[in-house]
Amino acid sequence: RRCARTMGVGGARMSAESTTSAAMDEAMELLRSNKVAAMEAMRNADSAASLKEVRVAYLGKKGSVTSVLKSVGKLPKEDRPKLGSLVNQVKEELEALFEERKVAIEDEEIEKLMVDENLDVTLPGTYRNRGFVHPIRATIQKAVDIFVRLGYELVDGPEMSPEIETDYFCFEALNCPEDHPARDMQDTLYITDDQKILLRTHTSAVQARYMKKFGPPFAIVCPGRVYRRDDIDATHSFQFHQIEIMALDKNLTLEHLRGTVIHFLKGMFGEEIKVRFRASYFPFTEPSMEVDVFFKGKWLEVLGCGMVDPAVIEKAGFDPGEWQGFAAGFGIERFAMVINEISDIREFTNNNLEFLEQFRFDTLDGV
């Protein structure tokens, strides 16, 4: 494109009246010469970079055209507004020429690139691979969202949900003293020789911490990574994820627990899911239950739950005669494997893109 804008050197506003001062005449002549030089430099610029340099040299804060205003102090008062107006007019005209030359140079560079590189514009474009939400993360978010909509508070982060935990919060506060037989069920990864610091074996420790610090009433959901001394195979790993909930208030009953669990499982598996409860044992709940769902033609164990043992409430410093509650916990990998028909837990951490790209969760809305 050619820049055919005609900008007169003088013009009506550039012609000085006979009454202008010598200083005004000198400033106008300087402005005129800078305008002519700037126009010539812009027309001769052959690249976007050189054009930008010209703009800065003439129209920047310290540019030649802008600097004409420095002489305004030498002018009579009646000439000062005139000079300011003329400078602004010249700057507007030069800015317009700059934009025209910028478009023209960009067009020229594109045409040159097409010739030099023999660009075939009919070829498909290149694209950057998109990332997707991991199945474990998507399952965690879906489960947490269900409880948050029920009014549960999400508890995570290093202060209330540390993965390096103390023996007290992981065992003793949950009705598992040193000589309790339930500790035989936990193959724990200890960090210190005295076995007082460890990698937590369950997120129940978060419940104990929260109850001791804040006290009832509350309803919390606690997701996080946990560790066990397990051999790695298709269904076991030394690290996995859990979500646990706890509600503590006055007059909570087993029916509240049952309704909460059923509502959650329908949210995960669908409204038509069949649920059954079986008696079981956990040291921190009494009574305790295992929960199964009838999914794709068979019963599957999915979580454990129960009413909070009075000893756990008393250990936190509260009266179990006044406060009652329930708790439930489940493994995220288990849910993700069942829902997505995954047969090997190791696939979640193998970094196998062919496996992960099957799911393509675009958002954290869940599975």
Image (cartoon, grey):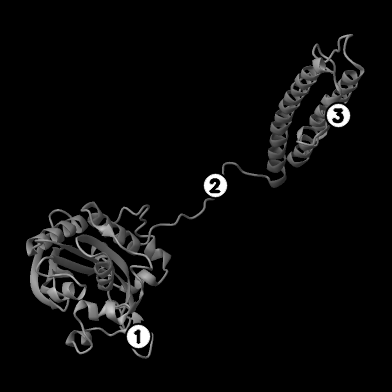
Q: Residues within 10 Å of mark 2 (few under 14, many from 20)?
A: few
**Residue 292 drawn above or below residue 110:** below
CA gap between label 2 and label 3 equals 43 Å
327 sits left or right of 213 in the view: left
Q: In the displayed structure, would residue 211 be above or below residue 14?
A: below
Mark 2 vs mark 3: in front: 3
Q: Which mark is residue 125?
A: 2
Q: Which residue is mark 3?
A: 37
Q: Is residue 113 left or right of residue 63?
A: left
* Extreme residue in the top direction: 18
Q: Quadrant of residue 92?
A: top right
Residue drawn at point x = 38 percent, y = 58 percent: 133
Q: Secondary structure at mark 1?
A: strand
Horizontal and vertical percent position of residue 173: 23, 77
Q: Name the residue tied to disc 1.
A: 190
Checking the image for residue 274, the label placed there is none
- The CA distance from mark 3 to mark 1 is 79 Å
Going from the N terminus, do you reach mark 3 or mark 1 first? 3
Number of numbered callouts drawn? 3
Whether 268 is drawn above or below 314: the answer is above
Residue 261 seen in this snapshot: yes
Asked if the residues shown at circle 2 and circle 1 are in contact, with their CB atoms under 8 angstroms apart, the answer is no
